[in-house]
Amino acid sequence: MVNLLLMVSVFAISFIIGYLLISRVPTRLHTPLMSMTNAISAVTILGGVLLFADDTTTFEKWLGASAIALAAFNVVGGFAITDRMLKMFKRKEPHS
Amino acid sequence: MDSTWSLLIDSIIIAILFLALGQFKTPQIARCGNWTASFALLCAMMVVLVRNTLQEPIVVVLALAVGGAVGWLVARRVTMIQIPAMVAFQHGAGGIAAFLISFVELTRDQSDFRLVEQLSGILGIIIGAATFNGSMVASAKLAGLVRQTPILLPKHNFILVVIVVGLAAFGAFAVFSSGLPLFIASLVLIGLSILLGAVFAIRIGGADMPVLISFLNATAGVAASFCGIIIQNRLLIACGATVAASGSILTHVMCKAMNRTLFKVLVADDLQSIATAPQDQNLITPSLFPTPEPVSQDGTPIDHAVEVIRDSQTVIIIPGYGMALAHAQFEIVKITNWLKQHGKKVRFAIHPVAGRMPGHMHVLLAEADADPEMLFDLPEINSQFQETDLALIVGACDVVNPAAITAKGTPISGMPILAAHEARYVLVCNLDERPGYSGVENPLYHSPKTILLAGNAKDTLNQLLQAFDASFRS
């Protein structure tokens, strides 16, 4: 029960702090923001890795490996695209 | 003692993540924030690897390497036009990972769960699988593989209700079962949820896509959180919750910008019943300026356009999804520079739902290197149209449709619009005169002060640029 309470409060606190921080993000950064949070949601990759902390059947191994690969695709791709996008926002130096 | 340490370490990682979000204020700092967030995830990964011994390290490393490499390559190759489709696709990848992990954890032999974990595992499966397929449909729509307009199945709402009832029934059964029945029930739940994602997403289209993408962003986060509850991992729960918060905010902002409730956008809106807009021109004529001389009918529209632009001192450019489709952002910036060279005041007015995802126009204009100081949001600039000589509309329709103010009972009624109709002249570079996604006639097209340059926006703008050069050489 204590454990459940802890998990619920982790969710609630993260949601509230996240909400407060993100509501201050200016409109023009909304696409990069979504792209970055998208990468963060691939934190499920930890769950995929943790599957292999116990013994796995062949079936579970395949599912686990697929989950890890897809989450890795999401996390690496998400951060890389966000970076490319934000790089474009930089004012380029005038050509001299 | 051990658990105190691990709680402390987890808290630090979550704090780093919040620090990253706090850095999303200007593009330059946000870039640093993006790296901070990836650092937080890397730390989380390290912690997991240190705390646990892996049984199959080779499989894990291989999967990581393959997924990461593909992700990196795709991210390098993708063009800015493809970004909305790509982001939607990645939501799907996150969803699929969440439901696979929930599924394995729930059904594996060693598992001995209490009610809460079992319930969150089942919710993780449902939300993850629905997010996965909803995102796939959204991505296919955005990439142009599926028709962008809403696809309405016969008895669409009925089908949705049947699927949801089925999910509730099998979900309830799965919560109280174990072993083989649980395995089978989970498979059925996955199938139903995938179906739900498709049925849910397929009827949302066009200008409602920003809401759908934001919503899927939020559900991907929620799926990750449930996944975190079943494996009892605080980091997963915290990261998922943060993403859910971000997605919720964006969804709310998008809905507000269209003056519609989330429920109406996602479920109940019937776009078949479209009222026609009133043709009363008085409603469109500005009060501040005397009615301008109607644009004369001799000569080509391009000539008139050049003439009007030459006479204008202040110009507001309104980009829309048509700009993205025509890849016309570079031409727009060229025109902007030309106008500025000739001493005109140029600004951009950006409607929150212009494009297909939140902030879409900003990214495209940044790609074309537009001066960020020139970009204004709707509330900042809307009062300026009255004192503006020319509103230049490029590929936008619904967001400047005065029928949103004047007509009742249309899908866009009450939606805040950019007041292009208040400018002295309006120049429209759209593909055709057809209504926008909402299906509501735009009376602005028929106003005497409007010059309509029909055709691909990129071609039209290039013609304009050539005409400028010619007119200033002579």
Image: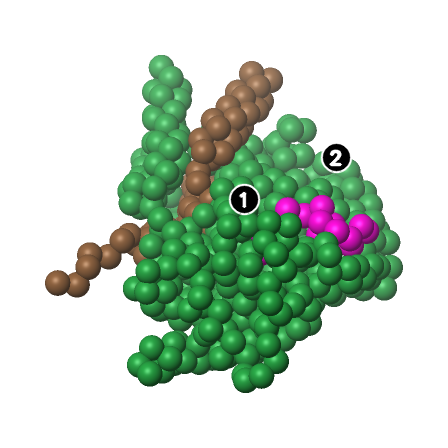
Chain colours: A brown, B green
Give the crowd class for mark 1: few <14, some 14-19, many >=20 residues within 10 Å: few
The answer to whether B214 is drawn above or below residue B65 in the figure is above
Q: Quadrant of residue B433?
A: bottom right
Chain assignment, label 1: B
Alpha carbon separation for disc pair 1 and 2: 60 Å
Label 2 residue SS: loop
Say which quadrant the N terminus of chain B sits in. top left
User: x and y percent of residue A37 in the render?
Assistant: 46, 44
Asked if residue B406 is among those painted magenta in the image, a careful observer would answer: yes
* Residue at 38 percent of width and 76 percent of height: B468
Q: Are marks 1 and 2 on the same chain?
A: yes
Q: Report whether B326 appears left or right of B339.
A: right
Q: Amino acid at mark 2?
A: Phe
Asked if residue A60 is among those painted magenta in the image, a careful observer would answer: no
- Marks 1, 2: nearer the viewer: 1
- Could you tell me if residue A32 is visible in this image? yes
Magenta-highlighted residues: B403-420
- Could you tell me if residue B430 is visible in this image? no
Are discs 1 and 2 less than 8 Å apart at CB? no
- Pick the front one: B288 or B470: B288
Label 1 residue SS: helix
Most extreme residue toward the left is A96
* Residue at 67 percent of width and 29 percent of height: B115
Q: Which is nearer the N-term, disc 1 or disc 2?
A: 2
**Dot 2 corresponds to which residue?**
B176
Q: Quadrant of residue B282?
A: bottom right
**Tag on residue B383?**
1
